[in-house]
Amino acid sequence: MKIEKRTESLKQIRSEAKVPGVLYGKKMDPTSIQTGERDLSDAYGKYGETQTFKIKLGRSTHLVYFKAVQKEIVNHSRFLHFDLLKVDKDDIITAKVPLIIIGRDLIENQERILQVISD
């Protein structure tokens, strides 16, 4: 994904089919960035919000992941904004993962109870 430092107004960036974003993390100041809609769509489709990947901003290379992505309400394929969180290879990242149990009603119809316990 090609990342550039953002210096122009949001209106101008969006008129050029680019998406504004922010890069932040430990030991660095938040940086306003931008990328092309196509590049963002491809990277988000490939990595989602669960995988890290490398980006180059200026002369520095950063290991990042998508922390947040905002999309248009009407046209859900268009991106409005994105946040990249810089991480180190030794960082521990935690996440809440929803469990969807398929066939739960088949078990409960047999007068059994299915209970999910997690911590």
Image (cartoon, rainbow, N blue to C red):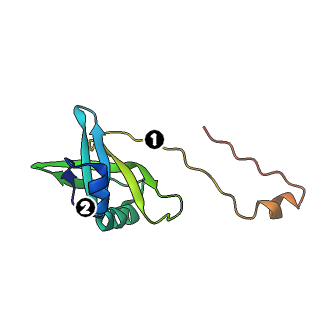
- Front-most of residues 84 and 94: 84
Q: Quadrant of residue 45?
A: bottom left
The answer to whether residue 90 is visible is: no
Q: Which mark is residue 94?
A: 1
The residue that appears at 32% across and 39% down in the rendered structure is 91
Q: What amino acid is labelled 2 in the image?
A: Met
Q: Report which residue position mark 2 lands on.
A: 1
Look at the numbered disc 1 and give the secondary structure of its residue: loop
Q: Residue at x 75, y 47 (%)?
A: 115
Q: Which corner quadrant holds the C terminus?
A: top right
Task: Indicate which label's residue lies in the foreground, 1 or 2.
Answer: 2
Q: Residue furthest right?
A: 111
Give the camera-side residue of 118 and 47: 47
Q: How far from the left and from the top, in percent, is residue 76?
A: 50, 63
34 with respect to 83 (left or right)? left
Residue in the foreground of this view, choosing between 73 and 4: 73
Q: Are marks 1 and 2 in contact (CB under 8 Å)?
A: no
Foreground of the two, 65 or 90: 65
* Res 60 seen here: yes
Which quarter of the figure is the N terminus placed in?
A: bottom left
Inter-mark Cα distance, 1 to 2: 24 Å
Name the kind of residue labelled 1 in the image.
Answer: Thr
The residue at the point 38 percent across, 51 percent down is 81
